[in-house]
Image: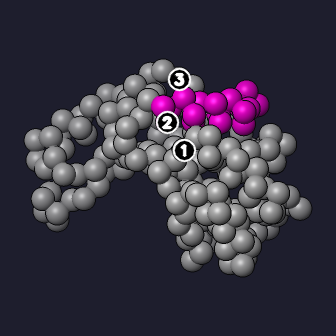
Amino acid sequence: SNVEELRAIDFSGSGEPTLHRRFNEYVDVVMDFVKKVNPNISVGVFTNSSTLGMESVVKALLKLEYVEAKLDTVIQWKFKVINRPHKSLNINNIIHNLRSFRKRFSGTLVIQIMLIKYLNVVNWSIRDAELMADILSTIEPDEVHVYTAYRMPRLSTVSRAKEEDMHTYGKILKERGLKVELYTH
């Protein structure tokens, strides 16, 4: 395909792209490429938000136009169950880092929320949505993207959110003035 037709280049993948030891260097290479071939190409990243407390990562992200950062829950015990993070990660630190990043980032910040059930734990109750809305209004993202699993999850202990639950969740966020996109399929 023709380079002039490119609209966006995003860092993502299986694993957290910002953890790569040369991430900052790769960002510079892509930004230089875009400047040369087509300055209208948007450059962004999909991140799990775990590295937003690292200044080297933040400096790289500040060069981008688009950051989509994951935040599936604002409750620590649910974060541990649903996201199964490294034991050093704490949801309150991630929230703090998202707020700090937003203050410094002039590009488009999107918060991505995946609604799932893991074992008997859900992250889409009305209370979950209300707490998320409270936190998101302090982060001030440009948009919120609400998903569920696209494919049937590999683990039988994981299941997708129902469309009606997603709509209820999204409605609560919208009522708080957040711009919400639902991805139900």
Q: Specify whether 44 is left or right of 134.
A: left
**Mark 1: few/some/many CA within 10 Å (<14, 14-19, 20+):** some
**Residue 94 picture quarter:** top right
| Residue 30, x across and y down, in percent | 25, 39
Residue occupying the far top of the picture:
55
Residue on which disc 3 sits: 54
Quarter that holds the C terminus:
bottom right
Q: Is residue 23 visible?
A: no
Cα separation, mark 3 vs mark 1, equals 21 Å
In the picture provided, is 14 more to the left or to the right than 117? left
The stretch of residues the image draws in magenta is 87-103
Residue 75 in the image: state x and y as whole percent: 79, 44
Q: Residue furthest right?
A: 120
Does 84 appear in magenta? no
**In this picture, residue 60 sits left or right of residue 17:** left
Residue where numbered disc 1 is placed: 140
- SS category of the residue bearing label 1: loop
Q: Which residue is mark 2?
A: 102
Instruction: Name the residue nearer the viewer: 86 or 102.
Output: 102
Q: In the picture shown, does residue 103 fall above or below 37?
A: above
Which residue is at 61% across, 63% downward?
174
The N terminus, quarter of image: bottom left
Crowdedness near tag 3: few (<14), some (14–19) or many (≥20) residues, C-alpha within 10 Å: few
Please name the amino acid that badge 3 sits on. Answer: Met
Above or below 15: residue 23? above
Residue at 27% across, 31% down: 28
Pointers 3 and 1 in contact (CB under 8 A)?
no
Q: How many marks?
A: 3
As drawn, 177 above or below 67: below
- Rendered residue at 44%/29% (across/down): 104
Residue at image point 80% right, 40% down: 76
